[in-house]
Amino acid sequence: MALTGLFLCSFLVIHLIGNLQLFKADGGKAFNEYAYFMTHFMPIKIVSYLLYTSIVVHACYALILTIGNRKARKVSYGAYKGSANSPWTSRNMGILGTVLLIFISVHMSNFWYEYHWGKVPFVEYRTDLNTLQTTQRDLPAAEFKEYVKYQEQGVEIIKAKDLYATTAFAFKNCWLVALYLLGMAALSFHLIHGFQSAFQTFGLNHKKYMPLIKCIGVWGFGVLIPLAFAAMPLYFFFCK
């Protein structure tokens, strides 16, 4: 649980840095280039498969631990007034994890699956290398099938799948936006407990550095990262 959890935390940081390209005012050019790179660069593809495996292992092992703990516990939490003995996040990691698993399934269906096998539109960007001004136009699906990047008479031309347009369209759905906000809330509480618990599992519970670990877990992974991800659907819903 600790190993897969920390691996997933590292992925969140990388994924967030890439997805911040959504906020660039370039018509999605940087984000679409990032999407292609993440799905075609072989080392990243290998890490992606490790990621998918980690999600499955993390979820399955959480289920095994939950069942084992319930069998071992002869008296319910209520009899011990669990709220006084352990934080709410600790006692509800299973619920939070279930919400996250549903969220990940929806997220993969809407974007990862659509990008690979769905009906993602195509776009062409033309950037004047002297003025750095970029224009774009939609491409008919029959005209283009794969990412290309080349220069022609002082103009950089990029043709790519327009995942940015797919994202913008998806986040006009209020129910999907609500699900993403719920998912990020669950992620926040899940990480507040899970991040520091992973280090405790490894025995890194010394008074000198545990306060720093807790600070990173709460304010970095528990607050900053979920808020940044939550800002993305809100940005497209209200501002685009």
Image: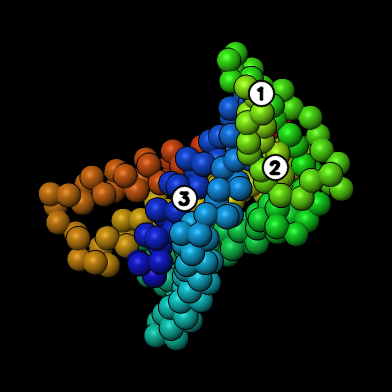
Residue displayed at 75% across by 59% down: 117
Residue displayed at 58% across by 27% down: 24
| SS label for mark 3 | helix
Quadrant for residue 104, please give it: bottom right
Q: Residues within 10 Å of mark 3 (few under 14, many from 20)?
A: some
| SS label for mark 2 | strand
For badge 2, the amino acid type reads: Ala
Percent position (x, y) of residue 90?
Answer: 40, 61
Q: Which residue is mark 1?
A: 153
Q: Quadrant of the C terminus?
A: top right
Q: Which residue is mark 2?
A: 160
Q: Residues within 10 Å of mark 2 (few under 14, many from 20)?
A: many
Q: Residues within 10 Å of mark 1 (few under 14, many from 20)?
A: few
Percent position (x, y) of residue 125?
Answer: 70, 30
Q: Nearer the viewer, residue 100 or 140?
A: 140
Instruction: Work out whether 101 lies above or below 155.
Output: below
Q: CA distance from mark 1 to mark 3?
A: 40 Å
For badge 3, the amino acid type reads: Leu
Q: CA distance from mark 2 to mark 1?
A: 20 Å
Q: How is the image coloured?
A: rainbow
Residue furthest top as drawn? 131
For residue 12, the mark is 3
Quadrant for residue 77, please give it: bottom left
Percent position (x, y) of residue 7?
Answer: 39, 60
- Labels 3 & 2 near each other (Cβ < 8 A): no
